[in-house]
Every structure is written in C-alpha cells, then in structure tokens.
C-alpha cells in the first residue's frame, strides 16, 4: 500500500518570502500522480498543483511550484512571494495511474502541514 | 456555477441514531467519493463510486453506508454501528481518467449530542 508522509506539522513564513513544504511517499509503482491540496479555514479542499510521475519537468502554477525527485520519492511544494491568503493546511496526495479501476482511483493523503503567513 | 454541494454544514447525532449526509454534484462527473477528516489526520476514504448503482468500500467503511441511484447524488449514512462518528466529512467527485483531480465540496461537520 502507498503511504504519504508530511514531516512538518507546522510551518511559518513572512509575507513576500518563500517557503517549501516537504512530502515523501512510498510506492512500488512506476507511474502515478501527485497532488498538493490547500485547505483554508473554510475547510474546502482546493487543488493547488499536480504532477505526473512520468514527466521529468516540475509542475508550476503561478507562485506555486514543485520539486519532484522520483528516485528519492520526494514531492515538495514551493510557495514564492507568500501572501496572507496562502495561510492554510496543505495536504500532499498520491494517486495510482493504474486504470484497471477498483481502489486505484482513490487519493492517499498525508497528514498535512499547517502554514502560517506572518505580515 | 458547477460544483459540489454538501448539506447540512453542521449535523448532530444522538446515540443509536442513523444520520444521512447529502452530496450533490452538477459537474457531470462519473466518480464520487466520501472522505473522513479527523484532527491531525489526513483524509481517509470511506466509500467511492465510479458508476450509478455501483460503489466500493474504502479504507474505513465500517459503520457507514452509501447509495448511488443517480449520477449527481452520493449520500452517506452514518449508522449507529459507527462508534466514533464525530469528524469532518468531505465529498468529492472526478472525471474518470488518468490525471483527473478530485473536486471537493465544503464538508459537513458531524458531532455527537
């Protein structure tokens, strides 16, 4: 079974600075997808960024980028020019790319990192 | 606007009572999911459905039941057999496809009276 580990329960960053959130995962599969979700105080889960394991290029979405190290099974999220609205719980998630169905469509989540942005 | 609607936002259950959480989506997604979130924990999958009239157990299905009679709807019943139901429940949906992300509703907070 796949597992996702977020080793930083809490992080803080100054407004306009850069912060990196860590995520490691364990899998025996070679093809899969990785996601970062944001959960603000409103509790809604919002997709931040996604990465296909077969792509070597790191995904980027505006101020959000990832550092995907497949051999190390590492998938960190970098937030540049941090804003007050970035304060939230961030979850790393794994999904199998096996399309044979069944439980392969489920997301496996880490326990989350609570990010505080200081003005 | 398309999206996922969960209701109610807050729900209280008495001992021995079954309660049903509603989840409706107008995104025309085939797959729907129910997750449970506890403090300090990530989300854990309760049940999921890829097609109408079919659903499968997730990692923590005991004490829960679901139905999928319509594509748009995937209600979750928390039965009296679930001894620790206090949690935040999130419903999600997605297109069936290799890299399709799941989209989430706003959640329901269930507490015991």
Image (cartoon, grey):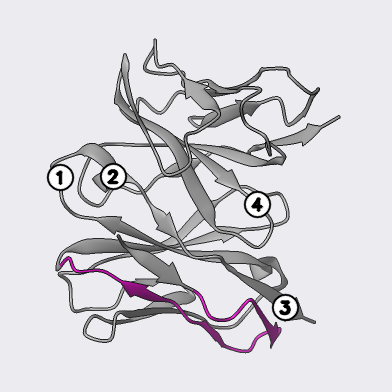
Question: In 3D space, how far apart are the residues under numbered discs 4 and 1 (Cα atoms)?
Answer: 29 Å
Callout 4 and callout 1 share a chain: no
Residue picked out by circle 4: B38
Numbered disc 3: secondary structure: strand
Kindly identify the residue that appears in the image at 34 percent across and 46 percent down: A106
Pinpoint residue A28: horizontal percent, then vertical percent. Answer: 19, 69
Return the residue at label 2.
A105
| Disc 4, SS | loop
CA distance for labels 4 and 3: 24 Å
How far from the left and from the top, in percent, is residue B96?
25, 37
Which quadrant would the C terminus of chain A be assigned to in this image?
A: bottom right
Instruction: Return the mark for residue A117.
Output: 3
- Cα distance, mark 3 to mark 1? 39 Å
Cα–Cα span, label 1 and label 2? 8 Å
- CB of mark 3 within 8 Å of CB of mark 2? no
Please tell me if label 1 and label 2 are on a single chain.
Answer: yes
Question: Front-most of B38 and A91?
Answer: B38
The stretch in magenta equals A6-29
Indicate the quadrant where residue B67 lies.
Answer: top left
Q: Contact, CB < 8 Å: mark 4 with mark 3?
A: no
Q: Is residue A88 above or below residue B78?
A: below
Q: Residues within 10 Å of mark 2 (few under 14, many from 20)?
A: many
Which residue is at a point 57% across and 88% down the rendered structure image? Answer: A18
Residues behind callouts 2 and 4 on a single chain? no
Q: Is residue A57 above or below residue B97?
A: below
The reply to the same-chain question for discs 3 and 1 is yes
Q: CA distance from mark 3 to mark 2?
A: 33 Å
Q: Earlier in the sequence, mark 3 or mark 1?
A: 1
């Amino acid at each position: 079974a796949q597992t996702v580990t977020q080793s930083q329960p809490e992080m803080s960053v100054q407004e306009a600075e850069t912060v990196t959130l860590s995520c490691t995962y364990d899998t025996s599969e070679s093809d899969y997808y990785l996601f970062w979700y944001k959960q603000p105080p409103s509790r809604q889960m919002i997709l931040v960024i996604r990465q296909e394991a077969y792509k070597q290029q790191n995904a980027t979405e505006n101020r959000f980028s990832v550092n995907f190290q497949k051999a190390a099974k590492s998938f960190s999220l970098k937030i540049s020019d941090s804003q007050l609205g970035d304060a939230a719980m961030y979850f790393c998630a794994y999904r199998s790319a096996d399309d044979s169905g069944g439980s392969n469509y489920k997301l496996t989540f880490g326990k989350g990192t609570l990010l505080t942005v200081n003005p | 606007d398309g999206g996922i609607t969960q209701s109610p936002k807050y729900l209280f259950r008495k001992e021995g009572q079954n309660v049903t959480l509603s989840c409706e989506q107008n995104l025309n997604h085939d797959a729907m999911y129910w997750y449970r979130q506890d403090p300090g924990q990530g989300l854990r999958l309760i049940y999921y459905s890829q097609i109408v009239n079919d659903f499968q157990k997730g990692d923590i299905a005991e004490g829960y039941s679901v139905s999928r009679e319509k594509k748009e709807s995937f209600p979750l019943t928390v039965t009296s057999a679930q001894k620790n139901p206090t949690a935040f429940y999130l419903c999600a949906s997605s297109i069936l496809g290799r890299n399709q992300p799941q989209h989430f509703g706003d959640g329901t907070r269930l507490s015991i009276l």
